[in-house]
Each structure stands twice: as C-alpha cells, then as structure tokens.
Image (cartoon, rainbow, N blue to C red):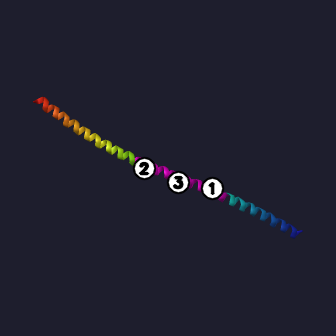
Amino acid sequence: MTGETTLREAIGRLDRAVDALEDAVGARLEKERDFGEAEAEVQRMNADRARLAKDLDKSEARAARLEEANREVSRRLVTAMETIRAVLDR
C-alpha cells in the first residue's frame, strides 16, 4: 500500500503542478493581451498627438497671417486718417 499511496500522492502533486502551470500560462496570456491593448492605445494616442500638432501648426500659421493683416489694416487706417486731417487742415 505504501507504493500505491506514494504514487497517488505523486499524481496528486503532478495534477496540482499542472493546474498551477495552466494558471500561470493563462495569467501570462492575459498580461500579453493587456499589453497589446495598451500598446494599441499608445499608438492611437500618438496618432492623435500628431494630428493635434499638425492642427496647432496650421492654427499658429493662420494666427500669424491674421496678425500681419491686422497690422497692415491698422497702418493703412493711420495713413488714411493722416491724409484726411491734412486735407481738412488746408
């Protein structure tokens, strides 16, 4: 009976070890899946960042053009007002 008991105990330990291994493999696969999802999210965020940077560059360029146009309009208005004053003073 001792040999039979030892064999049963060994088979029981083997079963528990196989169960633990299956659990470990399952946990590892889940972590890899989570990592893959996180990596995909980082890629989406980088794409969004690139798009936003491009939009910001466009907006800054437009703001610079508008600022330059504003200065030109202001300069022309000052010139026009000075011309009108000069005409009225005559």
Range covered by the magenta-colored residues:
27-56
Position of residue 67 in the picture relative to residue 13 (left or right): left
Name the element at disc 1.
helix
* Residue 33 or residue 57, whichever sits in front: 57
As measured in the structure, the alpha-carbon distance from the residue carrying label 2 to the one carrying label 3 is: 17 Å
Residue drawn at x 40%, y 47% as measured from the top left: 56
Quadrant of residue 32 in the image?
A: bottom right
Mark 2 sits on what residue? Answer: 54
Q: Quadrant of the C terminus?
A: top left
Residue drawn at x 42%, y 47% as measured from the top left: 55
Mark 1 sits on what residue? Answer: 33
**Amino acid on which disc 1 is placed:** Arg
Determine the residue located farthest toward the left in the rendered image. 90
Position of residue 26 in the picture relative to residue 88 (left or right): right
Which one is earlier in the sequence, the residue at label 3 or at label 1?
A: 1
Residue 29's place in the image compared with 67, above or below, is: below
Mark 3 sits on what residue? Answer: 43
Across and down, in percent, residue 46 comes to: 49, 53
Tag in front: 2 or 3: 2
